[in-house]
């Protein structure tokens, strides 16, 4: 069996009781970064073998992990923060497990995008999640495809690319399009800055953006 286990995006206490129990009962824990996951596991006094699983090795070890489960092991997959598979490694393993008739169970739990879209104050009855923007190729093509998108849009972005992305959004959606920049969700320095593209660009030109960022953009009228 394969369990997909969401882990806190900030405060460690955001983990669910069920997630703790699954991690304690698994034969091994597959982790994006074993050092980061080790901090979480030690906090909850969980001692299990860790297997490193990230974007640089996932293609090489998927079959080995499937073999372990076919031989009877129950494995739990975690990422550095949030739900595996959502802008994190996980999809390849889930697909391979399903193809091998291995039962896959995904636990509900932490993800950064849901608190961000609700806290943004923008419509959250319908929204689309775009994840991380393409760094180079495909960036402008994506923007063109979203010009007339009427649903609220959610993006992940790094601090050093935030201003460049906001400028691109201003060019694409207009300077008066409303948005929210949510940073460090569930952490000590959690903040949400709301405003038009012009206002957000002005603020983050004066204030150096830091931490993990979720961008929420209002849809077209």
Image (cartoon, helix red, strand yellow):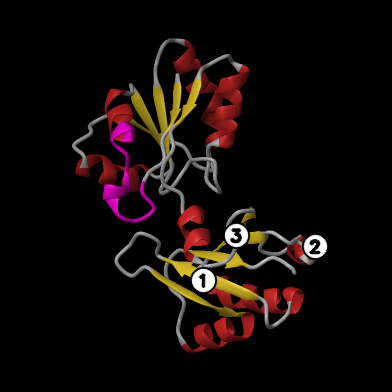
Closer to the camera in the image, 220 or 191: 220
Labelled pair 1, 3 in contact (Cβ < 8 Å):
no
Q: Residue 91: x, y in percent?
A: 58, 35
Q: Which residues are magenta?
A: 8-19
Residue 177 shown left or right of residue 47 in the figure: right
Q: Residue 180: x, y in percent?
A: 54, 71
Q: Residue 18: x, y in percent?
A: 32, 32
Q: Quadrant of the C terminus?
A: bottom right
Locate residue 190: give its quadrant: bottom left
Q: Residue 4: x, y in percent?
A: 45, 32
The number of discs equals: 3
Label 3 or label 2, whichever comes before in sequence order = 2
Q: Is residue 137 visible?
A: no
Q: Is residue 27 above or below residue 200?
A: above
The residue that mark 3 highlights is 154
Residue 40 shown left or right of residue 169 in the figure: left
> Which disc, if any, is residue 181?
1
Residue 188 shown left or right of residue 129 in the figure: left
Q: Is residue 1 above or below residue 188?
A: above
Crowd around label 3: few <14 · some 14–19 · many ≥20 (10 Å): many
Residue 158 inside the magenta-drawn segment:
no
The residue that mark 2 highlights is 141
- Kindly report which numbered mark, 3 or 2, lies closer to the viewer in this rendering: 3
């Amino acid at each position: 069996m394969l369990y997909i286990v969401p882990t806190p995006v900030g405060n460690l206490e955001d983990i669910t009781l069920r997630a703790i129990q699954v991690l304690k009962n698994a034969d091994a824990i597959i982790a994006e970064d074993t050092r980061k996951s080790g901090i979480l596991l030690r906090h909850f006094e969980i001692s299990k073998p860790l297997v490193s699983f990230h974007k640089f090795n996932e293609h090489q070890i998927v079959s080995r992990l499937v073999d372990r489960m076919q031989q009877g092991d129950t494995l739990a997959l975690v990422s550095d923060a949030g739900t595996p598979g959502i802008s994190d490694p996980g999809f390849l393993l889930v697909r391979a497990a399903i193809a091998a008739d291995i039962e896959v169970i995904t636990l509900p739990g932490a993800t950064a995008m849901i608190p961000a879209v609700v806290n943004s104050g923008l419509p959250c009855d319908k929204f689309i999640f775009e994840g991380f923007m393409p760094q180079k190729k495909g960036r402008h093509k994506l923007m063109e495809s979203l010009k007339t998108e009427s649903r609220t849009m959610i993006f992940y972005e790094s601090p050093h690319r935030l201003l460049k992305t906001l400028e691109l959004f201003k060019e694409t959606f207009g300077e008066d399009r409303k948005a929210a920049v949510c940073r460090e969700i569930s952490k000590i320095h959690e903040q949400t800055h709301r405003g038009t593209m012009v206002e957000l660009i002005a603020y983050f030109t004066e204030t150096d953006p830091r931490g993990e960022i979720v961008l929420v953009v209002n849809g077209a009228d």
